Amino acid sequence: MNIFEKLSLKIKTRNFERNTILAYKSFNQNMIKQLYPGGKKQSIRVVSSIGVILNEEYTLYDKAKCLGILNIYNSIMIRKLITESEDDLIRLSLLINAKEIVNEDNVDKIMAFVFMMTKNKDLIIDDDNLEIIILFSKQLKDNRQAREINEKNSKKYVDDEDYGLVVSKPIFTNNVEGSNRYLEKLKTEKGENLTWQRMCTWSSKNVEGIIDEYSLYLPSGDLYKKIYINMYSKSNSTYIPKGFLAID
């Protein structure tokens, strides 16, 4: 790269960062603090990273394009962290409401990036580490397909005596949060409160995705029962294993 190309890149980068910051500053300040713990520098990382995912020259983005990308980020963050929407609903909303930018080819990659940024505000994607987004987006896609299959089979064993009590007949929930909500409702047949601990994971040929084994304990600390939960479904089961009550 000669001196003129370097100068041109520097100017384009400066203009891009200015446009991104102008877009960032147009949002409600309280929302900014919650969604961008890394401040305006994080907003620049968001737009540049999604630009890489889109395979576009992000340094040429104007304020409107930067605003559009930040709005996509905001939407995912709000739905994921605040309203706790299901991933499938977040995906559908993006495809409907952000179709100028989002499509079937990039939606999982964009979601994967934002999900990863909730754990690391300093994350930035470039051509050298784009592969991690591709791998994570594939995992999201695989999980979505597993949820669709498991949803169809979710009521198959609910009337069996050992429903939820053996690996091959797990209780289906939606994500980790769904599993926690399900467990929080469980009481003993006498109405006693229970605590739980995730012990290990299993697999079963008739179930998509891993199956979590939980030990549930009485107030005394004694083991009450073990149950098996698969969190790869589109909704939480409303059925309860033998030996339990569900209290809302």
Image: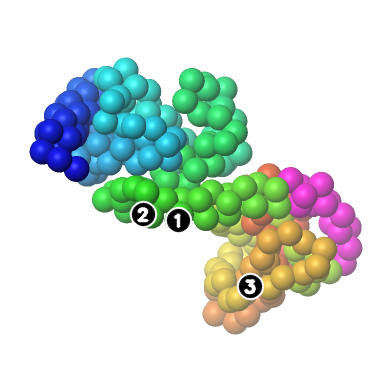
Q: Amino acid at mark 2?
A: Asp
Identify whether 74 is placed above or below 42. Answer: above
Model colouring: rainbow
Q: Is residue 36 visible?
A: no
Q: List the residue tagged with mark 1.
A: 132
Q: Amino acid at mark 3?
A: Thr
Visible in this render: residue 51? yes
Which numbered disc covers residue 128? Answer: 2
Q: Quadrant of residue 207?
A: bottom right
Which amino acid, by three-letter code, is at mark 1? Ile
Label 3, on which residue?
201
Q: CA distance from mark 2 to mark 1?
A: 9 Å
| Disc number lying in front (3 or 1) | 1
The magenta-colored residue range is 148-161
Tell which residue pokes out farthest to the top in this image.
Answer: 64
Q: Residue at x 34, y 48 (%)?
A: 126
The disc, 2 or 3, on the residue closer to the chain's N-terminal end is 2
Tell me whether the residue at label 2 lies in contact with that at label 3, contact meaning CB atoms closer than 8 angstroms: no
